[in-house]
Image (tube, rainbow, N blue to C red):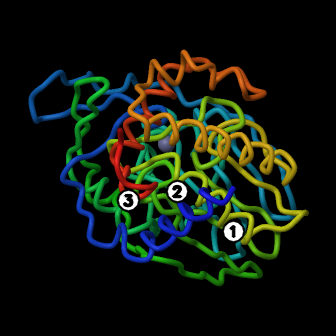
């Protein structure tokens, strides 16, 4: 514990200045699901998403004025504000028309992206074109405004058209007052990408965290875009300060989490951080982490434990100065 607190302090110090000057010179590993898109920069360019016939998606009421559309392919949070609808994330490119169909006729006036991945921002252009004001962290706006490369898939993803890019950005935190709701948008440094945001609906006590919590899919660390295990644990701890025992946590994928669910995942991520950082600090590889049985020490079975170890090791190498110095 003592060594962790020392490490924690180093990383906490880092956060004060990190992320403020980063431009998307390099971007996007498939941290979570990356929908194919056209590209113009060479390499293997995937085909455009196949257009789907719009279909009604499952929608679940959470609390007064708050509901969730599922299977887009992840979750889209919907808030009725009295001044139009607010969405948190907009679904994948080929699901956007289904999200719109499910919402019905009431206009979407605000859209907040939790991060840049295409399965959270694929409907931006559709809703932006219909008049929605789009909010995101400044770094997420930068990712969405430039073509980016996905190394694990050897392909490029094109920038969003201008109409789909965030126009209202923040660095640390901002608060929107819409109707009866107070909406806090805050930064989560390097938790999954480099531009992650949480969105707290203060009165409804619902907290959207994007891919910073992952009860269904393997937790993903988009190391190429700056996400890493230390950032993940720090961010999950920060969210414990934002939430309380009655808060409902909405992840990008999977069921709504209670605080007990969330704390259990945080403990799992802390264990993975503790074990992986020590092994990488002593020169061990992703395969070594797997061979050491680390993934058998947690309650969950990951679909692809090697990929998690690989991404964790890459992120730790990228941040090795944050957790103690020399790798031996
Ligand atoms: Zn993601």
Q: Is residue 104 left or right of residue 193?
A: right
State which quarter of the image contains the C terminus: top left
The residue furthest right is: 246
Pointer 2 residue Cβ closer than 8 Å to ligand 1: yes
Label 2 element class: loop
Residue that mark 3 sits on:
140
In depth, the one of 306 and 289 nearer the eye is: 289
Q: Is residue 52 left or right of residue 263?
A: left
Residue 275 is tagged as: none
Q: Residue at x 26, y 71 (%)?
A: 21
State which quarter of the image contains the N terminus: bottom right
Q: Is residue 92 left or right of residue 2?
A: left
Pick whichever of labels 1 and 3 is earlier in the sequence. 3
Residue 200 is tagged as: 1
Distance of label 2 from label 3 (alpha carbons): 8 Å
Give above or below for 12 relative to 194.
Answer: below
In depth, the one of 147 and 59 nearer the eye is: 147
Q: Residue at x 78, y 67 (%)?
A: 243
> At which x and y percent is residue 227?
43, 48
> At which x and y percent is residue 91?
53, 42
Distance of label 1 from label 3 (alpha carbons): 18 Å
Residue that mark 2 sits on:
114
Pick whichever of labels 2 and 3 is earlier in the sequence. 2
Q: Residue at x 67, y 41 (%)?
A: 271
The residue furthest front is: 328
Q: Mark 2 near mark 3, Cβ–Cβ under 8 Å?
A: no
Label 1 element class: strand
Q: Residue at x 52, y 24 (%)?
A: 289
Q: Is residue 96 visible?
A: no
Give above or below for 145 relative to 254.
Answer: below
Q: Is residue 286 visible?
A: yes
> Dot 3, crowdedness within 10 Å: few (<14), some or many (≥20)?
many
């Amino acid at each position: 514990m003592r060594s962790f607190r020392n490490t924690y302090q180093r990383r906490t110090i880092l956060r004060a200045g990190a992320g403020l000057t980063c431009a998307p010179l390099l971007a996007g590993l498939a941290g979570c699901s990356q929908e194919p898109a056209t590209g113009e920069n060479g390499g293997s360019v995937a085909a455009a998403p196949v257009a789907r016939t719009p279909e009604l998606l499952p929608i679940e009421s959470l609390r007064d004025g708050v509901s969730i559309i599922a299977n887009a392919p992840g979750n889209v949070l919907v808030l009725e504000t009295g001044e139009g609808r607010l969405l948190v994330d907009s679904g994948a490119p080929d699901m956007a028309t289904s999200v719109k169909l499910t919402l019905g006729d009431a206009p979407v006036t605000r859209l907040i992206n939790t991060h840049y991945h295409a399965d959270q921002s694929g409907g931006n252009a559709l809703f932006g074109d219909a008049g929605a004001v789009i909010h995101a962290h400044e770094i997420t706006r930068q990712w969405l405004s430039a073509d980016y490369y996905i190394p694990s898939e050897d392909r490029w993803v094109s920038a969003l058209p201008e109409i789909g890019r965030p126009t209202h950005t923040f660095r640390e935190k901002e608060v929107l007052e819409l109707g009866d709701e107070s909406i806090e948008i805050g930064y989560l440094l390097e938790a999954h990408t480099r531009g992650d945001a949480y969105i707290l609906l203060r009165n409804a006590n619902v907290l959207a965290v994007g891919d910073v919590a992952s009860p269904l899919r393997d937790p993903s660390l988009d190391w190429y875009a700056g996400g890493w295990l230390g950032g993940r644990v720090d961010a999950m701890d920060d969210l414990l300060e934002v939430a309380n025992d009655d808060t409902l946590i909405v992840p990008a994928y999977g069921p709504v989490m209670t605080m007990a669910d969330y704390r259990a995942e945080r403990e799992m991520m802390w264990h993975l951080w503790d074990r992986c950082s020590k092994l990488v600090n002593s020169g061990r590889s992703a395969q070594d982490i797997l061979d050491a049985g680390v993934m058998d020490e947690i309650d969950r079975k990951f679909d692809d434990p090697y990929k998690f170890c690989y991404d964790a090791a890459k992120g730790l190498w990228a941040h090795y100065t944050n957790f103690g110095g020399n790798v031996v």
